[in-house]
Image (cartoon, rainbow, N blue to C red):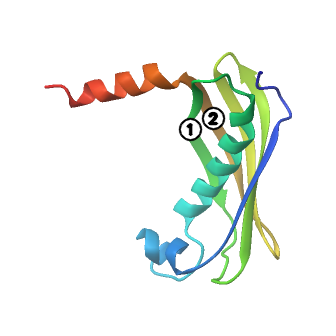
C-alpha cells in the first residue's frame, strides 16, 4: 500500500462542555476550543492515511498551521476534512478545513511524517534514560 496525493479524510464531533475553550484552558468562553479544532483536523488526516501504510508504520504530526475563523456554540455538530496534497518520501502535506452546520470555521495546512512504530518508540524511550 502507499499514500498518494488526493487521499481524503473526515472526522466529526459535537461541541459539548468537554471540548470548549474553557475546558482546554485556551479561553474563557463556552465555544469550540481551538485545541480541539486542531485535534479534529489531525484526526481526519491520520485516519485517511493509516489504511494505506504498511504494517508497523504510523504517521506523526509535525506541523500544523491553521486559522480558527468562526466560533461554534455548544450543541452544534463540527467536522474536519483533509486531503493529501503532497507526498515527498515520508513527508506528507495535507490541506485541512473545518466546518460547522453554518459553514466554514477554520482552514490550514498540516504536515505528517511516516514512521516505523518500533524504531520511533525506541528513540522516544531513550529520553527516559539517565
**Residue that extends furthest to the right in the rendered view of this protein:** 6
Q: Quadrant of residue 90?
A: top right
Q: Indicate which disc residue 63 carries.
A: 1
- Residue 116 vs 84, above or below: the answer is above
Residue at 52% across, 81% down: 17
Residue at 45% across, 80% down: 28
Q: Nearer the viewer, residue 76 or 65?
A: 76
- Residue 26 vs 93, above or below: the answer is below
| Label 1 element class | strand
Dot 1 alpha-carbon crowd within 10 angstroms: few under 14, some 14 to 19, many 20 or more = few
Name the spot of residue 82 as percent of width and height, x first: 76, 46
Name the spot of residue 92 as percent of width and height, x first: 68, 28
Name the spot of residue 109 as percent of width and height, x first: 68, 42
Name the spot of residue 10 as percent of width and height, x first: 77, 53
Q: Indicate which disc residue 49 carries.
A: none
Left or right: 95, with 130 as reference point = right
Q: Nearer the viewer, residue 90 or 25?
A: 90
| Label 2 element class | strand
Left or right: 115, with 89 as reference point = left
The first of marks 2 and 1 along the sequence is 1
Q: Is residue 66 visible?
A: yes
Dot 2 alpha-carbon crowd within 10 angstroms: few under 14, some 14 to 19, many 20 or more = many
Residue at 82% across, 76% down: 102
Quarter of the image with the N terminus in it = top right
Task: Mark 2 and mark 1 in contact? Answer it, CB < 8 Å.
Answer: yes
Residue at 36% across, 22% down: 123
Q: Is residue 27 visible?
A: no
Q: Nearer the viewer, residue 107 or 61?
A: 61
On the image, numbered disc 2 is attached to which residue? 111
Amino acid at each position: 500500500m502507499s499514500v498518494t496525493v488526493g487521499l481524503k479524510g473526515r472526522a466529526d464531533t459535537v461541541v459539548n462542555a468537554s471540548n470548549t475553550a474553557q475546558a482546554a484552558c485556551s479561553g474563557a468562553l463556552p465555544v469550540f476550543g481551538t485545541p480541539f479544532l486542531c485535534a479534529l483536523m489531525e484526526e481526519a488526516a491520520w485516519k485517511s492515511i493509516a489504511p494505506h501504510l504498511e504494517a508497523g508504520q504510523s504517521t506523526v504530526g509535525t506541523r500544523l498551521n491553521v486559522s480558527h475563523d468562526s466560533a461554534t456554540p455548544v450543541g452544534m455538530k463540527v467536522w474536519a476534512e483533509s486531503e493529501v496534497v503532497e507526498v515527498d518520501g515520508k513527508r506528507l502535506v495535507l490541506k485541512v478545513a473545518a466546518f460547522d452546520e453554518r459553514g466554514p470555521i477554520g482552514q490550514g495546512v498540516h504536515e505528517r511524517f511516516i514512521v516505523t512504530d518500533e524504531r520511533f518508540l525506541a528513540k522516544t524511550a531513550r529520553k527516559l534514560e539517565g
